[in-house]
Image (spheres, coloured by chain):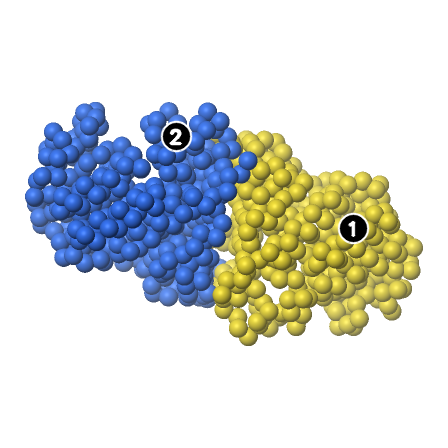
Chain colours: A blue, B yellow
Amino acid sequence: MQSGMYYSPEPAAGKPAVAKGEFPIAAVALDHGHIYGMCEGLTGAGANVKWVWDPDPKKRGDFLKKFPDAQEARSEDEVLADPGVKLVAGAAVTSERCALGLRVMRAGKDYFTDKAPLTTLEQLDAAKETAAATGKKYAVYFSERLHVETAVFAGQLIEQGAIGRVISVMGLGPHRLSPQSRPDWFFVKEKYGGILCDIGSHQIEQILFYTGAKDASVTYSRIANYSHPEYPELDDFGDASLVTDNGAAGYFRVDWFTPDGLQMWGDGRSVILGTEGFIEQRKYMNLGTNDGPGHLFLANGREETHYNVHKKVGYPYFGQLILDCLNRTENAMTQEHAFKAAELCVRAQLQAVTIA
Amino acid sequence: MQSGMYYSPEPAAGKPAVAKGEFPIAAVALDHGHIYGMCEGLTGAGANVKWVWDPDPKKRGDFLKKFPDAQEARSEDEVLADPGVKLVAGAAVTSERCALGLRVMRAGKDYFTDKAPLTTLEQLDAAKETAAATGKKYAVYFSERLHVETAVFAGQLIEQGAIGRVISVMGLGPHRLSPQSRPDWFFVKEKYGGILCDIGSHQIEQILFYTGAKDASVTYSRIANYSHPEYPELDDFGDASLVTDNGAAGYFRVDWFTPDGLQMWGDGRSVILGTEGFIEQRKYMNLGTNDGPGHLFLANGREETHYNVHKKVGYPYFGQLILDCLNRTENAMTQEHAFKAAELCVRAQLQAVTIA
């Protein structure tokens, strides 16, 4: 093994993107726990949560324990009517995320939604039209790239040419089901959107991002319910192949089969193959070890290196998103990229063959 | 992490399958270096190499250095005419492997060929007919399962129910190209058969084996030459999705992009997902470490364990093959399985979409 460590992770800015109070946000629709990661990411970059709203008082109460400075709104309208709110973060039921986004954008605010950002092509059209008409953002929390340090570092390495031209991106996105912890809507396909749309959306976004593609075709996709007849609308397995407009081969597999003996909810991996080397991410754990998260492996012409980037990279997305909202720029992620990922995850699901 | 080590590898029989001289073999056609692994496997299980033949005296001479007890034949006919030879091992140019096999079987001997075992469906028909007519075997050296200890142990674990029903088998088969070390035929598609047929054959055989399937369909496959315009008939990348007749989802990726900084010719992996857990094989190396080969990771309901099985499992295939030849049994691998893997690798290649 040639171990060089020729590269170093570039840490995200150590200081907030804005001064305290300069970027008030609201949390609306707390149906998925991702709302916490979304708000933590933004507040870590300088935002403050001014309002929280959800029809369920229990969800509001839980949220206020983590964000005690937020005010409990009496309605969504109260939040949307506040001209001080710059951005609304929402983790609604997946099929309702677009409708919320339309209301937010029409109220003159940027929208930051949990993934998947929407579940149908009709919703996508409405989101695109409203974003264009209002000039507001429909940003998406693709957490498995934006809120994962190896994923950020992988992007830096590719940009620095560490593996040459990216020709293949392969993602594994296993998840633990824990059905007793899931709300009813989680098992209704019209609501959660299907596995390729739901947890597959992370994967498709990564394929587009790491290949630097503007577009892609879903060449083959499939779903199955192998082992959960009690939830007939649950896809417990799915995979898909894509080809990007710049000729790279994407593939991902997602499932709900993480076993209870595993230390983590999922052994998320990404293997990015370039013409000059490859990168493997072991995002949340290094299987069979107690070494924590943040493992990236790089092999190219001059090195085979295990980089541990836990607490070394951070999450530049959130500060960039705040500044993008203030400056009307697109450094965190372009709207086109977010909508393209949204489109492809819906298409992957629509095209999917069901394995009997 | 719950570390249990509930399983132990079952070592292959420590003693030879036959007494010295009881199973004389010949090595004919030394076009690929796999002939050494094939003959080492068989002699390790008790066979003796009686003859060697190749038209190239240099190849014969090199072989005799490793197997000095072999006799140098004057022709293939001399080998085939010897009634003492039980089996002929051959690593011919891929497109000529079937023709050699037909001659071997018609001479009343079993045949053991390097993979891919053949390159066309017409050859497959001829091989099937001749095997049936002569009652002889057309066995195949699928080395990435048969000659890899983690691969053997994975089979044992699945048989013992360690991961429940196998629903998905994913294989990564990267290889180093080292073009200067390759003969001309290696770059001629009609001769090497295409990447999905060639190194893909290992992967397809594993998908059939680990799922316990009798048959499968190639649902999508693709090839590319991303980076080697000087070898226009080389596929330097390929991948394919299969669905087995018992409903499992197979996927594999193969390529010729192993970078020079990597310690090994390829970081071969296999991830086998079951309803009750999963297995990852890191066959030849544990990326980013100097820990040698033989790493298998098992996670299920009660453990997340790193099993190092280097020199703990061995290779039962070879002794079983010898006994199968002597006893006319099929414990090492059924003929049906070998031909089905052969068929599917040809079909994967025939169906492949070329990425521009």
Q: Residue extending furthest bottom?
A: B230
Left or right: where B219 falls relative to B54: left
Give the alpha-carbon distance from disc 2 to disc 1, as whole Å. Answer: 48 Å
The reply to whether residue A175 is visible in this rendering is: yes
Amino acid type at image mark 2: Phe
Image mark count: 2
Query: Mark on residue B49?
Result: none
- Name the residue: 69% across, 59% down: B119
Give me the chain letter of mark 1.
B
Q: Secondary structure at mark 1?
A: helix
Q: Is residue A62 above or below residue A120?
A: above
Q: Is residue B109 above or below residue A59?
A: below
Give me the chain letter of mark 2.
A
Q: Nearer the viewer, residue A40 or A34?
A: A34
- Residue marked by disc 1: B128
- Residue marked by disc 2: A187
Left or right: where B142 falls relative to B132: left
Are the two marked residues, 2 and 1, in contact with CB atoms closer than 8 angstroms?
Answer: no
Q: Nearer the viewer, residue B177 or B207?
A: B207
Question: Looking at the picture, how far across and down is residue B322, in whole percent?
Answer: 79, 46
Q: Secondary structure at mark 2?
A: helix
Left or right: where B63 falls relative to B285: right
Amino acid type at image mark 1: Lys
Q: Which quarter of the figure is the C terminus of chain A placed in? A: top right
Question: Looking at the picture, how far across and down is residue B226, in whole percent?
Answer: 49, 66
- Name the residue: 38% across, 50% down: A344
Q: Nearer the viewer, residue B61 or A226?
A: A226
The reply to whether residue A305 is visible in this rendering is: no
Q: Is residue A287 above or below residue B76?
A: above
Question: Looking at the picture, how far across and down is residue A237, in whole percent?
Answer: 47, 38
